[in-house]
Image (tube, grey):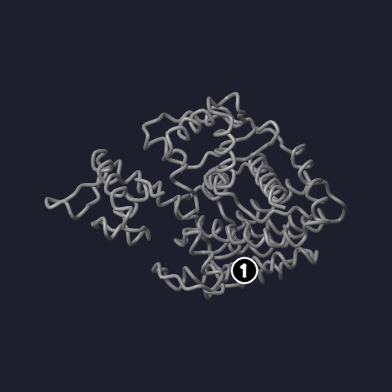
Amino acid sequence: MVSKYDIFYVVAREGQTTVADILNILKKPKTDYQIIFNHIITLEREGFVKRDLNIKKINVLHSKKAKQLFDIIHSCAGNKIDYNILLREDMVKFLVNASKKEFFTLGDIKLNPRTFQIYVTALSNYGLILLISKKPIKAKLLRHHLVKEVFDFFDRKIDWYAPKKRSLMSQIKKEYSKYKKNLGTGYNLIQQIEKSKEQHFIYMSLHLEGNPATLPDTQKIIAKENTSNGYNSVDIQEITNYKKAVDMMVSYSGKKLKLTKDIILEFHKFAMNHTFHAGKFRQQNVVIKGNLEFKTSDWKMVSSKIDNLIERYNSFEKKKRKIGEVIVFSAFFHNEFQRIHPFEDGNSRLSRLLMLYLLRFHNLPVMDLPYGYFDDYLNLTKRSKIRDDPTFVYVIEEIVLFNLRKANREI
């Protein structure tokens, strides 16, 4: 059933509209006229819209609250998140309690057990919660700016937990063991699941770099469907080119091809084929826009530093490694590569691709960067003022666990 938030989003995007237009845009029958009109009355009373003098045209009010609401709904729509669930009053209470403790259980949330289960499942599917265990449910609400925006909209004070930086290796090993058993019976299904996760990774990785395409539109572009949302050719080429590089990463890691300088250059050439410097190390010094304290290597040292990094990689691969060692080295490789910053552009998206390459080379089925890690990931990488590999390892552990749990849940 259509909600007041659905109505508001239509009015806000249109600027001015009518009930008839809203029915048409939402593809609702004329019999829903009164329902929509009643929602408009509610929205007008709450100060989000206003009808003109002849009560036919509906206008959005340009207020702080209206902007907050639009930003939340717009972010949700772009990430396939049901804003009608996220904006429920008891969901807000859930989020308030969940934000206080790093790992919460039903006992920490004053909510009906069935509703608690529904909300944990939904937020986990949206990438906003890391599910640690299912029976009993133990989970972690991820510190994403969307949650803060919801709190701000409802005038609720956010009291985020302080991360305790504890290893999740025992849970990772348990889920990995389960995953290996599932491989025998659900291989084809796993391949289908990975395609969906690959699309999300491409979206998230480019979203972190400012590509404006939403998740639904990214999926359409990958599927070569027409999208009329006004993206320029570079936005679209970034997606299609990165898709080719990710496909190559999946293929090469699956074939157990060891990483080389030439492979790195090949990945970059495909990912950045829309630029003139694709597949070429930079010939000038660069800085991170917005963070001058993030130090990158002098361009004259790039080639030798990449050689040293590959040498460390080859040394790492000389003997069989445990899961924990693989995660630690993958996190190190990501941070080292990003700080060498060997290319004029595309370094961060390639850092993420190479980290996945190393994890997948060692059979860890990581193919997604969950939405909820957007802020923590950036704060520990190109937003960071001080390099902090140990904390970054904890984040990567969580991302590995998230991917394993999701794979096992969907098989």
Q: Mark 1 sits on what residue?
A: 268
129 or 56: nearer the eye? 56
- Where is residue 171 drawn, in percent x and y? 74, 38
Residue 286 vs residue 141, the one in the foreground = 141
Residue 252 seen anywhere in this rendered image of the structure: yes
Q: Nearer the viewer, residue 289 or 400?
A: 400
Q: Residues within 10 Å of mark 1 (few under 14, many from 20)?
A: many
Query: Which of the 4 image quarters holds residue 134?
Result: top right
* Kind of residue sitting beneath label 1: His
Examine the rendered structure and indicate whether residue 325 appears above or below residue 202. above
Please give the name of the residue rendered at 54% of the width and 64% of the height, measured from the top-left corner.
219
Q: Judge by depth and name the residue closer to the eye, 177 or 83.
A: 83
Q: Position of residue 189 (x, y in %)?
A: 72, 59
Instruction: Report the side of 8 relative to 120 (left or right).
Output: left
Classify mark 1: helix, strand or loop. Answer: helix
Residue located farthest toward the left when viewing the structure as drawn: 53
Q: Is residue 332 visible?
A: no
Residue 372 occupies which quadrant of the picture? top right
Q: Quadrant of residue 388?
A: top right
**Relative side of 47 to 110, left or right:** left
Can you say whether 284 is above or below 405 in the image? below
